[in-house]
Image (cartoon, rainbow, N blue to C red):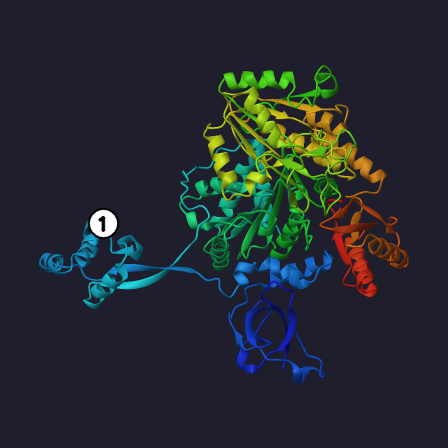
Amino acid sequence: MQAARILVDGQSDLVLDYGIPPEAGDVKPGCRVQVPLRNRTATGTVLTLSEPDPAWKDKLKPILKLIDPEPLISPVMMNLASWAADYYSVALDQMIRCLLPETVRQENTAEKMRKMVHLEKRPSREELDALYRKAPRQAQMLDYFSSAEQAEAPLAEFGTGALSIARNLEAKGFISLKEESVHRDPSSGEQFVPSQPMKLNGQQQKALEEITVMCTAEHKKPVLLQGVTGSGKTEVYLQAVSQMVKSGKSALIMVPEISLTPQTVQRFKSRFAELPSSVAVLHSLLSDGERFDEWHAIRSGKARIVIGPRSAVFAPLQNLGLVIVDEEHDASYKQESSPRYHGRDLAVLRAHLEDCAVVLGSATPSLESTHNALTGKYSLVKLTERADGQQLPLIRILDMKTEGRNKSGPNVISERLRMSIDRRLDKGEQVILLLNRRGFARSIQCPDCGHVVTCLHCSLPLTYHRTEDRLMCHLCGFKALPPRTCPECRSANILLQGYGTQKVEEILRRTFPAARITRVDADVARRKNAVRTILNQFRAHKIDILLGTQMIAKGLDFPNVTLVGVLNADLGLHIPDPRAGERTFQLLTQVAGRAGRGDLSGEVIIQTFTPQSPSLQYARHHDTDGFAAQELEMRRSFDLPPFTHIAVLTIRSQHENMAEFATRTLAARLRGMLPPPATMTDPMPAPIPRAHGQFRFQITVKGPSARILSRTLRKLVQEAGLGDDLTAVIDVDAMSFM
């Protein structure tokens, strides 16, 4: 009897071995099964099959039942999960949970059903008159089909008590009751106006031809589509996907932010309006029912186009022909909790395993992708002009050291930016303002003793949120009431320091009282469909000024936006992260690209205290290639990605001394295990030494092979046998070092 390793459904990470009896049928990896678990029956997913250890063979409990004769996980997706588990140094069951969302694995999740009334026989005039005299509600139900000129309707349309009425009519042979499944559509209630393919310019046509060639090539290369903002990359995507659908294949479109999903869905549903059910959406804000229905629509082949953020890379698409990763540079493709996979990299791997084409699109490609294109690993296609022929917006950099010299307090909106906003509003044009910090005030500080109110669980100041009148930790979510006096010296002079989007919104409302102003940040985005509603209102010109964090900086297309203001370009620049300059350049270039996308010319004003920064100067001239060249040279000099791989080992504990001692002990062992030319740093506290109530120490390793780094660190942690008070986290190809 063979054995099956099974991931048991539930919140715990139960992975157990069971025997496969002959009556269980053809059990394969990826199948769903019923198994005995203590004194109850549970369901689970088969991970692997093996020959059991003879010593345990007779002690294995048998599988009770094969739920699905066909695996829910295809062999290709199982290979993807196995590769990712090894590469990112996580257990296979963690990757399986990504392939099969909890709502798909839950025993109590099922299709939503509704009863339908189907007309079997139309009554004669005499029969209908007789029913009106004896049973008027039965007659009304039958009369409905005459007036509606249809033979089927949902039972719910007939009001309370309709079931007993329908059963009486069914007994008389007039109708029949049937049940049908109801697809819970995340886009229900929205109208999508059909759109037609646009005429491509020469560069767009060349890009489409390159993608088409790669779709049929024997040796497929990823295509890096580097196009300036507004160059029409989305139209190229649409026409490439249309070719795939016509050839009977499916397509996956990945976007970095949920805020971009509504706009992308609208464009694809409009283009494929004749096949509205062919476009499916997967993201974290779906209800369990919506996720369940969308997942099964994809797996069944009913939906052949899938749109979503990084987790969409695991969508169960059949016959995949094309994968598109839009804004491929975006850091949000890297998951910052376990399993710490990179959605873009797994998309490239999945395309390789599925033998299909993959397109990575961006106006500001990541240095990793740029390096791959320069070395010939990727095929590079450039779009250097805007599709509408408009010029890229003029970018002005304001040195706030001189702008705010005569101001008392923080100069949030410079006089030049205020005047520009006034001019644009007077002309009926729209404005986008970027501040990549939410909340009202960055911190609360006592001017008498210098005390800053910090999180009880993290080494971070608490941010004041005025709408909730709460102090919040943006790392662990801890909330507290704001103190009225200093907790240290009891002084009543406690002051708010810095500013966030909430405070800027208040300032804007005072400065531009007639303007319609809306804020978009993570606080607003928590409400379902809130971002979609706001962006639709902005598109309909019901909002004059849109203020937001980096959520509004990329991918959005609003033709009436002529001014973009960046209120503090320095926020992400001066942090201990080798990618800080790259991210700042990308963010500024992306948000600048929101201006001047229609018939009107655009303008961008960037407020900064470090105008000499290369990130700002290259962004000012829209010089992506120039920035990449100097940044790659710097990375090569310091042996940083993409010329090496970096993995970070973090040791966490509630006890600082224990975490530090364990990290130093592991570092001593690691020095003897790490093969050359790999190198490592000395153990040190993390840039944020305490988070979520735990002290954190780190070791950073570098080397030419990420897989060797991953396996070495995994072996180190396994052999160390850390106790319950210590947690080890391995982050391969780390994107954040905080």
Residue 263 can be seen in this image: no
Residue in front for this viewpoint, 445 or 373: 445
Q: Is residue 669 above or below residue 326?
A: below
Report the quarter where the N terminus lies: bottom right
Query: Within 10 Å of the Cα at label 1, are there few (<14), some (14-19), or many (20+) other Cα atoms?
Result: few
Q: Where is residue 303 drawn, in percent x and y?
A: 47, 53
Name which quarter of the figure residue 138 lies in: bottom left
Report the quarter where the C terminus lies: top right
Q: Where is residue 266 drawn, in percent x and y?
A: 47, 40
The residue beneath circle 1 is 148
Q: Residue at x 45, y 41 (%)?
A: 271
Residue 265 can be seen in this image: yes
Q: Amino acid at mark 1?
A: Ala
Residue in front for this viewpoint, 192 or 318: 192
Q: Is residue 326 left or right of residue 277?
A: right
Residue in front for this viewpoint, 736 or 615: 736
Q: Where is residue 164 drawn, in percent x and y?
A: 25, 63
Q: Is residue 341 above or below residue 55?
A: above
Name which quarter of the figure residue 101 lies in: bottom right
Q: Where is residue 716 drawn, in percent x and y?
A: 83, 61
Q: Is residue 703 left or right of residue 604?
A: right
Tag 1, which secondary structure? helix
Residue in front for this viewpoint, 396 or 158: 158
Q: Is residue 416 above or below residue 192?
A: above
